[in-house]
Amino acid sequence: MTKYTKDHEWVRLDGPLASFGITDFAQGQLGDVVFVELPEIGRRIAAGDQIAVVESVKAASDVYAPVGGEVVEINSALVDAPDMVNASAEGDGWFAKIKLDNPSALDGLMDKAAYDAFVGSQS
């Protein structure tokens, strides 16, 4: 089950952990990603906290935590290959995994259909 935020992040629950990253729409808007600053393992975050930075040839953009919890794993492959975000934003280009404080927090986020409608209303 993947959910989406209005800031163009996605979050996917996998047991007690949730992976997150930026959406395919977001990476398309950014252009070629050249650097990703990932959060520290062990960092406690609240939903909406600035948690990462993505830099592209066009701009730098903050990434916000879609849910609250503790960062337990990062995708260190992005350090050497930030272009994975462009190639697979909602797959291999994930940023980190969070141990959720409250799994029901996902209930307040958009599903794919609602996110697609939101993106369509932005143009």
Image (cartoon, rainbow, N blue to C red):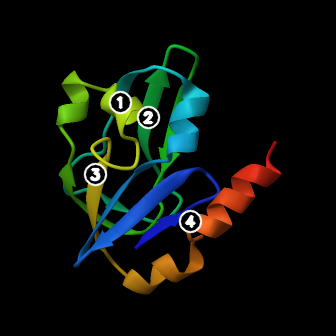
Image: 67 above or below 80: below
For label 2, the SS is: strand
Residue 41: percent from the left, percent from the top? Answer: 19, 51
Tell me how far mark 3 sits from mark 4, CA to CA: 20 Å
Disc 2 marks a residue whose amino acid type is Val
For label 3, the SS is: strand
Mark 3 vs mark 4, foreground winner is 4
Q: Mark 3 or 4 closer to N-term? A: 3
11 horizontally vs 17: left or right = right
* Residue 53, label in figure: 2
Badge 3 vs badge 2, beta-carbon distance below 8 Å? no
Q: Mark 3 or 2 closer to N-term? A: 2
For label 1, the SS is: strand
Disc 3 marks a residue whose amino acid type is Ala
Mark 2 vs mark 4, foreground winner is 4
Image: 41 above or below 37: below
Q: Mark 2 or 4 closer to N-term? A: 2
Q: Mark 1 or 3 closer to N-term? A: 1
Q: Quadrant of residue 79?
A: top left
